[in-house]
Image (tube, rainbow, N blue to C red):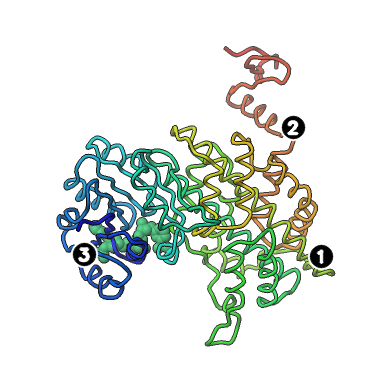
Amino acid sequence: KLADIGVTGLAVMGSNLARNFASKGFVTAVHNRTSAKTRALIEQHGGDGEFIASETTADFVASLAVPRKIIIMVKAGAPTDAVIDELSALLEPGDILVDGGNSQFLDTRRREETAREKGIHFVGSGISGGEEGALLGPSIMPGGSAQAYESLGPILEKISAHVDGVPCCTHVGTDGAGHFVKMIHNGIEYADMQLIAEAYQLLRTAAGLTPVEIADVFAEWNTGELESFLVEITAQVLRQVDAETGSPLVDVILDAAGQKGTGTWTVQTALNLGVPVSGIAEAVFARGLSSAAHQRAGAQKIGLPGPSSPWVVEDKDAFIEQVRLALYASKLVAYAQGFDVIAAGAKEYGWDIDNGAMARIWRGGCIIRAVFLNRITEAFDEDASLLSLLFAPYFTEVMTRAQDAWRAVVAGSALSGIATPGFSSSLAYYDGLRAERLPASVIQGQRDFFGAHTYKRVDKEGTFHTLWSGDKSEVEAS
Ligand code: NBP
């Protein structure tokens, strides 16, 4: 008997994914560089389904039915290249090689091109949901050729998360499109987490709520339009008491946020594409600031001045509602910006990405799963060429309803010295987007002054330059 699918790389993600395949009835070939891990998987979980374990790469390849379908789940970067090289030498035209790791989409484009020259279908696939998702149903974002998806897709759809019976997996687009969309997903995740953390900070500092009280607030929010995995788990984190000290765990955890780099990739990519992603960028920068231990200690030491009076919230219930609305509005901005990068990436790299379908496959399995993704899908289904998510009537209504609260929260945090980079920058983006006139005309004037960079006029066609160091008359630039 030959295997339907193979997984190489059996650390937490790979072994859970292999168990997921096997438990869904697929004969699953498994392999790992260090074969002790392969043996451990079979010993501990061999009963999950039908596995074919191999110690060598050659045996692993030989154990698969043709066309072979292999998922690589090893560390992104050089290890992934090494595994691709080793496997490619053993594969035949028509075989499908999937990279399920967190690879940079430009690496995926390069690898796909090389594989294509050998007739091998290379599929860079985003997989989200961490170890639990891999085992029970992740959100899967496969790129690569449509032809590869025809035979690979049904297998991936079967092991993916399902919401309302719909799989959280769809063909995203060619070559690196899957890893691109996974990267944006992670960027949005950064923003979402930062915004929830800012909401916590406001409730704690301005309203004086305890972590457990804030957990109750989040649990309540999780029954409404903010219902999402991240809000739900934040409530659980806030409820946790440290066994050693008896303090809320959140007070014992060092306030220095780590990162693995996918948020940075999103921002770098957006910068390259010229798309503002302030919400995501601020989230990445906020993690950076949190980890700048020496500078933060230095600021404490010299006592950098803050405002003289703290924020005294009178009506706590009203304030909680304001923070909820500020969170919702800021979150929408982060998603709108994320989808803007997807649109710009699709244009730049020639992908045909269905934004509504992306929101649909993020509804389950992944970290940013949330009820309001349904509304995003509906918005793009209604108008696939939506210029901004914020222009969809449903979301415009949210902004109408939320903006006063959002402004009050941002103003209050500025006056009382509570850092809310996510809330504040999202509001600034929103007001910039709305503005009929922006001070960019001043910038164009400055650029023309010092660099003769020219400008366009509102009242006629053409490109112009003012002779700033001459008689200050305007000339038409060629
Ligand atoms: P790791 O990222 O920790 O990678 C460990 C695996 O890579 C082991 O199987 C190891 O084999 C293998 N490996 C390495 Br390292 N170098 C190798 C080489 N030169 N040749 C062959 N194999 C090599 O595992 P993970 O945390 O399970 O993640 C796997 C992938 O999934 C990564 O790309 C990760 O970014 C991505 N991902 C992870 C999560 C998550 O929540 N952890 C979520 C989504 C995506 P060995 O056993 O012989 O050392």
Q: In which image quadrant can residue 449 be found?
A: top right
Q: Amino acid at mark 3?
A: Ala
Q: Position of residue 49 (x, y in %)?
A: 31, 67
Task: Give the quadrant of residue 10.
Answer: bottom left
Residue 274, position in %: x, y? 54, 36
Mark 1 lies within 8 Å of ligand 1 (Cβ measured): no
The residue at the point 24 percent across, 35 percent down is 117
Q: Which mark is residue 318?
A: 1
The residue carrying mark 3 is 53
Residue closest to the eye, 280 or 325: 325
Marks 3 and 2, how far apart in space?
A: 65 Å
**What secondary structure is marked by label 1?**
helix
- In three-dimensional space, the C-alpha distance between marks 3 and 1, rounded to whole angstroms, equals 59 Å
Mark toward the viewer: 3 or 1: 3
Give the crowd class for mark 2: few <14, some 14-19, many >=20 residues within 10 Å: few
Look at 27% across and 56% down and name the residue there: 6
Placement of the C terminus among the 4 image quadrants: top right
Mark 2, residue position: 437
